[in-house]
């Protein structure tokens, strides 16, 4: 009927597209229907919903699914367990997917059981850093002592943009007061002003302690926290601790004293900041980048590579030299979907 009406409209001088739109079909659908000739049964997805399928569940079977799912032995179980228990009794009514579908249709597909349902936590907002002292990340890791079961706590703050260690301390315990003292010293050392930096961390006790949060508020430091039990939200600090514990000269035996641990970390920090070629910032030492020396250093590397290509162009076979351009924007927890938008550059670190 639709094809006949559209053809009649065209014969009267109407254009094809407005005629199709008036009947709610596209021009592609119209041309497809004409090619099929006399086989003009409606095969659109919308019409399939209203067609009856021989294998479809009957109303009695759907009612049986609802009845069983809400009886006392099964009311706290998910459908895949209900199906298994019914099979043990020699009973088969429908598949797991059918149970899920029927429960969904009757708005009963909810968390079944006494345990609290799993809650989805939104990702922390993305923090953008275009220079040093805009975004800091910090965490605490354990260093073994000679007393079995006792550890020293290494508090370490790093700059996300430059990867430089900006402050650290080692104590025998984890307390928010100690963390507050460390961030205060770090802000004084680097001349941090109010609302200049974001400080990202996980959800540990020292990170969210009252003294720590009050200190951040008084300093004008904007806190940022990872999702609960998600270490990937604090990747820069986790990567730093891996470098620390897998460096070749990391002690094979536990630290004999707190002073020994501090002495070793002091040497590591100097090596990491001044000598370590960090892969995330084009193999530049973190403190060199922190001081702004990476631009000239990478420019010289680029000049060396271009000169080498000029001397032996056939070795490159027409390819460009290695990209030694400096890393500009660094994002902590960058947005992975449209729904998660990064902070404004004025607000983001």
Image (cartoon, rainbow, N blue to C red):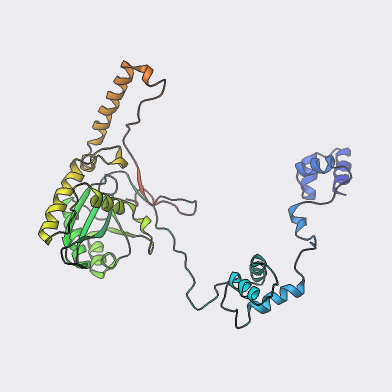
Where is 224 relative to 16, above or below?
below
Q: Which residue occupies the foreground of this view, 260 or 148? A: 148
Residue displayed at 30% across by 24% down: 305
Q: Quadrant of residue 143?
A: bottom left
Q: Is there any visible trace of residue 247 in the rendered image?
A: yes
Q: Which residue occupies the foreground of this view, 282 or 295? A: 282
Percent position of residue 218, x then y: 23, 63
Q: Is residue 89 left or right of residue 316?
A: right
Where is 159 relative to 306, above or below?
below
Q: Quadrant of residue 96?
A: bottom right
Where is 75 relative to 123, above or below?
below
Percent position of residue 81, x then y: 58, 72
Percent position of residue 342, x then y: 41, 51
Q: Which residue occupies the foreground of this view, 183 or 110? A: 110
Residue displayed at 22% across by 36% down: 293
Q: Is residue 240 left or right of residue 3?
A: left
Q: Which residue occupies the foreground of this view, 164 or 341? A: 164
Q: Is there any visible trace of residue 108 in the rendered image?
A: no
Percent position of residue 304, x then y: 27, 24
Number of numbered discs on residues: 0
């Amino acid at each position: 009927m639709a094809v006949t009406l559209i053809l009649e409209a065209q014969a009267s001088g109407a254009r094809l597209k407005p005629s199709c739109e008036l009947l709610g079909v596209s021009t592609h659908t119209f041309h497809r229907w004409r090619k099929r000739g006399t086989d003009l049964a409606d095969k659109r997805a919308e019409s399939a919903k209203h067609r009856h399928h021989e294998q479809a569940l009957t109303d009695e079977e759907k009612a049986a699914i609802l009845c069983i799912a809400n009886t006392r032995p099964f009311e706290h179980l998910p459908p895949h367990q209900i199906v298994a228990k019914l099979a043990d009794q020699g009973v088969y009514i429908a598949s797991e997917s059918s149970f899920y579908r029927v429960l969904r249709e009757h708005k009963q597909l909810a968390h079944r059981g006494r345990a609290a349902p799993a809650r989805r936590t939104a990702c922390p907002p993305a923090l953008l850093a275009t220079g040093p002292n805009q975004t800091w990340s910090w965490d605490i890791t354990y260093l073994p002592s000679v007393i079995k079961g006792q550890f020293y706590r290494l508090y370490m703050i790093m700059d996300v943009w430059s990867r430089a260690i900006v402050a650290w301390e080692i104590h025998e315990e984890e307390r928010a007061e100690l963390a507050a003292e460390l961030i205060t010293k770090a802000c004084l050392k680097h001349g941090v002003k109010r609302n200049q930096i974001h400080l990202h961390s996980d959800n540990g006790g020292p990170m969210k302690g009252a003294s720590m949060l009050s200190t951040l508020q008084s300093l004008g430091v904007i806190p940022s926290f990872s999702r609960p039990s998600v270490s990937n939200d604090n990747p820069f600090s986790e990567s730093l601790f891996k470098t620390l514990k897998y460096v070749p000269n990391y002690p094979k035996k536990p630290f004999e004293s707190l002073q020994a641990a501090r002495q070793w970390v002091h040497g590591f920090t100097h090596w990491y900041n001044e000598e370590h070629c960090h892969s995330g910032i084009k193999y530049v030492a973190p403190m060199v980048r922190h001081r702004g020396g990476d631009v000239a250093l990478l420019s010289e590397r680029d000049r060396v590579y271009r000169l080498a290509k000029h001397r032996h162009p056939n070795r490159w076979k027409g390819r460009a030299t290695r990209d030694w351009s400096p890393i500009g924007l660094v994002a902590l927890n960058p947005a992975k979907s449209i729904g998660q938008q990064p902070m404004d550059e004025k607000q983001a670190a």
